[in-house]
Image: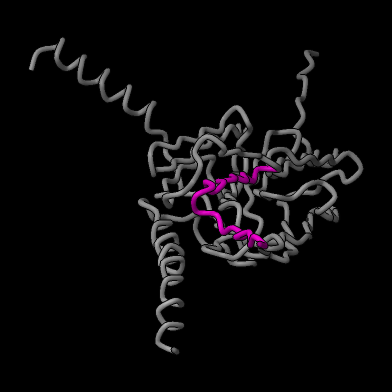
């Protein structure tokens, strides 16, 4: 292997390292009512700017970048400022156009509204 | 006659099946968790020494300033509060990993701190407490005088 090749490989691996920052799966709750599915995820340290939600067909990916700089010398460490990443398979019948998200105190609330077709509906009875 | 009713009922099984599918489909790809969430370890915290002060950063997702009670002593700090993980009204539960936690955790520091000058803030679910060291233990520079 010559130097150019080696260089390329190293560059390649470096690019990979930037892409794949260490990430952990956030803890989630999944709730449902007649109108929507609600996903709640603990993502402490994630701001609106660092949040990335991707819905492709039935695959939902939630990513959050944690920006927590620790100054000084660490005396005790129980958590690391790892990013959050988790993927789900979303049930059919979600209206992808109407998905909305809120971020409050490091907790993500993702609203996945059901499309009209799967919502339970009242059948009107017509009087003669 | 009852046979007819039975058949009629069966047509609603399609809805149950949809519900079952929804339950099953929420299986995620990558397993892995944020480690133990035992109450004794909530909130998880890091402690750093910047020289003049100690900085404690703790993960408190979903909590704001008013949900936390901080009590300071000379060389310890107690963080108290409750994190509610209940389902919102009218929702059924598919998966629940964010438990309700009632916590009171005391952190002991390796040196005396100045309770008067300690400040705390919560941002994006992270609690940061800045604890200036007591004057007696703060590192200081000594000028060497020439005689």
Give above or below for A20 relative to A10. Answer: below
Q: Which residue is more in the foreground, A10 or B126?
A: B126
Position in image of residue B53 (x %, y %): 75, 37
Position in image of residue A11 (x %, y %): 27, 18
Return the residue found at the far right.
B116
Residue sitting at 39 percent across and 57 percent down?
B25
Rendering colour mode: one colour
Return the residue found at the far front.
A128
Magenta residues?
A105-128
Q: Which residue is more in the foreground, B146 or A16?
A: A16
Position in image of residue B83 (x %, y %): 72, 59
Quarter of the image where one finds residue A16: top left
Figure quadrant of the C terminus of chain B: top right
Give above or below for B105 relative to B57. Answer: below
Return the residue found at the far bottom.
B2
Return the residue found at the far top.
A4
Residue sitting at 78 percent across and 36 percent down?
B138
* Residue B30 painted magenta: no
Position in image of residue A28 (x %, y %): 54, 54
Figure quadrant of the N terminus of chain B: bottom left
- State the count of labels: 0
A23 to the left or right of B63: left
Q: Which residue is more in the foreground, A22 or A110?
A: A110
A1 to the left or right of B64: left
Residue sitting at 61 percent across and 39 percent down?
A101
Quarter of the image where one finds residue B77: bottom right
């Amino acid at each position: 292997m010559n130097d150019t090749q080696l260089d390329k490989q190293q560059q390649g691996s470096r690019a990979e390292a930037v892409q794949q920052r260490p990430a952990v799966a956030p803890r989630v709750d999944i709730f449902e009512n007649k109108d929507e599915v609600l996903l709640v995820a603990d993502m402490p340290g994630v701001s609106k700017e660092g949040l990335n939600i991707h819905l492709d067909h039935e695959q939902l990916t939630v990513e959050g970048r944690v920006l927590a700089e620790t100054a000084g010398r660490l005396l005790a460490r129980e958590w690391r400022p790892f990013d959050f990443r988790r993927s789900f398979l979303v049930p059919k019948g979600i209206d992808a156009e109407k998905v909305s998200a809120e971020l409050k105190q490091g907790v993500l609330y993702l609203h996945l509204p059901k499309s009209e077709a799967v919502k339970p509906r009242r059948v009107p009875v017509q009087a003669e | 006659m009852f046979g007819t009713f039975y058949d009629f009922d069966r047509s609603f099984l399609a809805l149950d099946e949809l519900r079952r599918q929804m339950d099953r489909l929420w299986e995620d790809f990558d397993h892995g968790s944020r480690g133990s969430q035992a109450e004794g370890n909530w909130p998880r915290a890091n402690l750093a020494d910047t020289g003049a002060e100690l900085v404690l950063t703790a993960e408190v997702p979903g909590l704001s300033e008013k949900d936390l009670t901080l009590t300071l002593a000379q060389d310890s700090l107690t963080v108290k509060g409750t994190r509610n993980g209940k389902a919102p009204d009218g929702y059924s539960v598919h998966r629940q990993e964010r438990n309700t936690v009632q916590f009171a955790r005391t952190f002991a520091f390796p040196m005396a701190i100045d309770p008067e000058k300690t400040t705390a803030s919560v941002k994006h679910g992270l609690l940061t407490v800045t604890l200036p060291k007591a004057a007696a233990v703060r590192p200081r520079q000594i000028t060497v005088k020439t005689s």
